[in-house]
């Protein structure tokens, strides 16, 4: 994170994966971090990180819960500079088996949650010029993902929302960007791919020869949140080891 010292960062979905990697890196570099997550283990995780890290129990699909996380950051530090909303998950299944209830859950979890996080955080962020927001979409957003159509549609919507929100808040000096990870080497990814053997099959397909780590994605998000990216807004950056080049 190019400008961490004294910055206040709220990471929604910060108890695992890319969010946890971002919280760990930012806090170690001197940012003041609040992790917001539905996982109660997040409190212990936050306490175990180096630096100034607090935890807010948070349902990312509930505006009131997100507002309480924002309020915790503002009450604790007097302001909020950065929001990284990195929540998501796919329900696998072919389109003809995708029922309306699952469709709605996919949209709520993967798209509406980002809208709600921004809605809660924007008044605090726009109160000071130079604020920034980063969302997490997915490479699936630009693919024909027949086995996770609801997820792909929601993440594609998030890319569009990123552009719209960036244009809407630009006059306040606030920037909005998005990362779109591909395969990322997390415990969940390994479980979904059947362990080491499946992971090696994916690795063999990667042009750069590696499956990106959560830290690789987090570093890109933190760059987009930093003043080093002060002229970057409305953009989506793909982090996928060259697997997809849209």
Image (cartoon, rainbow, N blue to C red):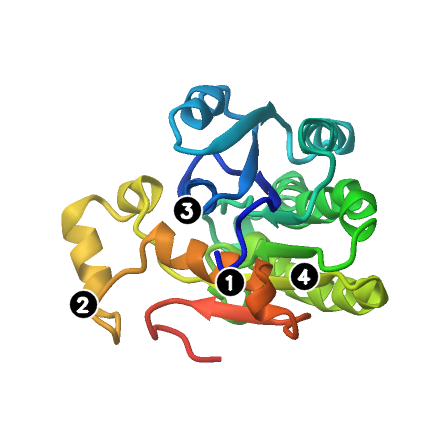
Which label belongs to residue 204? Answer: 2
Mark 3 to mark 2: distance in Å? 28 Å
Of badges 1 and 2, the one in the foreground is 1
Which residue in the protein does label 3 denote?
A: 25
Which of marks 2 and 4 precedes in the sequence?
A: 4
The spot of residue 123 in percent (x, y) is 83, 45
Which label belongs to residue 223? Answer: 1
Crowd rating for badge 4 (residues with CA inside 10 Å; few <14, some 14–19, many 20+): some
The spot of residue 114 in percent (x, y) is 67, 48
Secondary structure beneath dot 2 equals: helix
Q: Are marks 1 and 2 in contact (CB under 8 Å)?
A: no
Q: Are marks 3 and 2 in contact (CB under 8 Å)?
A: no
Which of marks 2 and 1 precedes in the sequence?
A: 2
Which residue is painted at 30% across and 51% down in the image? 185
- Vertical placement of residue 126 versus 39, above or below: below
Mark 4 to mark 1: distance in Å? 23 Å
Crowd rating for badge 1 (residues with CA inside 10 Å; few <14, some 14–19, many 20+): some
Which residue in the protein does label 4 denote?
A: 157
Q: Are marks 4 and 2 in contact (CB under 8 Å)?
A: no
Mark 3 to mark 1: distance in Å? 11 Å
Mark 4 to mark 2: distance in Å? 30 Å
Crowd rating for badge 3 (residues with CA inside 10 Å; few <14, some 14–19, many 20+): many
């Amino acid at each position: 994170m190019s400008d961490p010292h004294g910055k206040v960062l709220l990471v929604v979905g910060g108890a695992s994966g890319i969010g946890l990697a971002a919280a760990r890196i930012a806090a170690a570099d001197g940012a003041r971090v609040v992790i917001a997550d539905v996982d109660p283990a997040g409190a212990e995780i936050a306490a175990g990180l180096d630096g100034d890290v607090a935890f807010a129990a948070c349902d990312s699909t509930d505006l009131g819960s997100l507002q309480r996380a924002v309020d915790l950051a503002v009450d604790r530090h007097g302001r909020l500079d950065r929001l990284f909303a990195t929540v998501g998950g796919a329900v696998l299944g072919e389109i003809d088996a995708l029922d309306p209830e699952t469709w709605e859950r996919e949209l709520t979890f993967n798209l509406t949650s980002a809208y709600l996080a921004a809605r809660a955080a924007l008044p605090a962020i726009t109160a000071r010029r130079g604020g920034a927001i980063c969302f997490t979409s997915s490479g699936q957003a630009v693919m024909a993902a027949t086995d996770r159509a609801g997820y792909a549609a929601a993440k594609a919507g998030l890319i569009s929302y990123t552009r719209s929100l960036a244009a809407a808040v630009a006059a306040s000096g606030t920037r909005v960007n998005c990362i779109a990870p591909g395969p990322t080497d997390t415990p969940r990814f390994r479980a979904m791919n059947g362990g080491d053997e499946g992971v090696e099959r994916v690795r063999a397909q990667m042009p750069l020869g590696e499956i990106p780590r959560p830290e690789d994605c987090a570093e890109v998000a933190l760059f987009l949140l930093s003043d080093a990216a002060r002229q970057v807004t409305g953009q989506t950056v793909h982090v996928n080891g060259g697997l997809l080049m849209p």
